[in-house]
Amino acid sequence: MPELGRMPIFEIVAGLADRRVIDVEFMYKPRPTSDRARIVFDAALRSRLAVLDPPRDALLISADSDATLDSLAELLADYPDLPILTAIVNPMLWEGDPGDTPHRLGWPNPGNWRRSQTSDRWWRIAFVLEIGKQIAAQNPNALTNGYLTMPAQDAVWGRDLLARLLHFSDQHARNGLPAAVSPYTYHQHAPVPGADIQPDLIRLMNRTFGRDLLFGWKIRRDLVQAFWGKMGLIPIGMCDALLKTVDQTIWEDDLEIDRAIRALGYGVRSLWVRDPKVYRQAPPVFNEDDLRAVITRTLHYSLNIPGTSVGGSTLAIPLGGLARIRSQIDRRFARDNAAAERLIAECSAPVRERLDRFGASWVDWGAYRHVIRVGIPGVEVWQDSQVTILPN
């Protein structure tokens, strides 16, 4: 079994200096212990590790604790040739006056809450961009030949995915650097052997998050966001400029990274993937309550956007013309869409009630509570010092 533990940043940079693709895995808690959750987690992680090509590629684990690193040791022992580096990365507490949000929003035991400087994901992204910046400073060849990726834990990679993305990145090079690229798919939930996930639930989640039947066309024409947090390759050469440009108070970090890349004049494109064997997602969503948690979180991503629907979220936008036509001729599509709209409405109602009462809403994700206000881009991040919030 590999020995995993804290590593100084200079050692991490040295170990990653000549790599083609650096897969950075954000681990917010130990490997799941329940059977179905572990099956799904392991299958997705193994799919990503299997695609890496040692010694050209490497794995960097950004974990919340030594306990999380220890929980991964048994699985990682199956990849003895893969360079593996590790770091413990958690957000720091807010400096100065944190404000009185817990009191104003009526949370239980408001004195227990401690505000963080950023979300834990942003803190890890900034850490990774700093790693990339230092790699580029030491190895100019990495500017155009090295990439970072920070996939979500539910991203499932097929054998050809990285090769396709690397070629796609070169095709859309701009301003002296290959493009930052992401795959996008309608397959945002998928079966996993042994996990016993109901096909109706998988279809319902895919319909909920795939109601825009023209989204693939929009992606191909670069009319929508192109960098996606579920999976994206960032050239090492962009890291320094991105670190200086991104606003780390924005909760929807992938949209902010997309904005920053475009503002810097670099290329950013999304690759539409129809074949789930090339790329899909397999989240630990086993019932409608799990799906409600994902919908609620997604509603909050765009809550700061003023609009008549909750947060201006695309989830709350009515079906387009093509989808309306399909719903008239495809009974299953119509049934699934009606179920999706029911869930979206159920999740939107308490958010709207909070907005009406407090002018803000919040959602728990992992060990943190995120507070979002309409019209205010930044998000407040809090943690209860006395209670561990169960991860969604």
Image (spheres, rainbow, N blue to C red):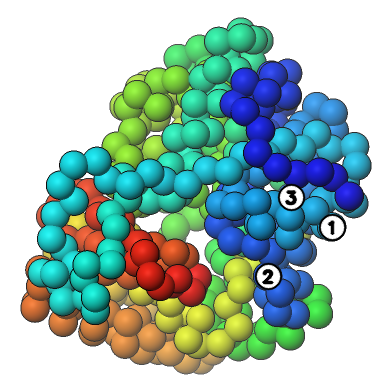
The residue depicted at 43 percent of the width and 81 percent of the height is 292
Whether residue 244 is visible, yes or no, is yes
Amino acid beneath label 2: Pro
Q: Secondary structure at mark 1?
A: helix
**Could you tell me how far apart the alpha carbons at marks 1 and 3 are, in whole angstroms?**
16 Å
The image quarter containing residue 214 is bottom left
Crowd class of label 2 (few under 14; some 14 to 19; many from 20; radius 10 Å): some
Q: Amino acid at mark 1?
A: Glu
Residue on which disc 2 sits: 32
Q: Nearer the viewer, residue 56 or 388?
A: 388
Q: Is residue 276 above or below residue 392?
A: above
Q: Are marks 2 and 1 in contact (CB under 8 Å)?
A: no
Q: Is residue 114 left or right of residue 150?
A: left
Where, by quadrant of the figure, is residue 303 drawn?
A: bottom left
Residue at label 3? 48
Q: Say which of 99 and 380 sits in front.
A: 99
- Residue labelled with disc 1: 74
The tag earlier along the polypeptide, 2 or 1, is 2
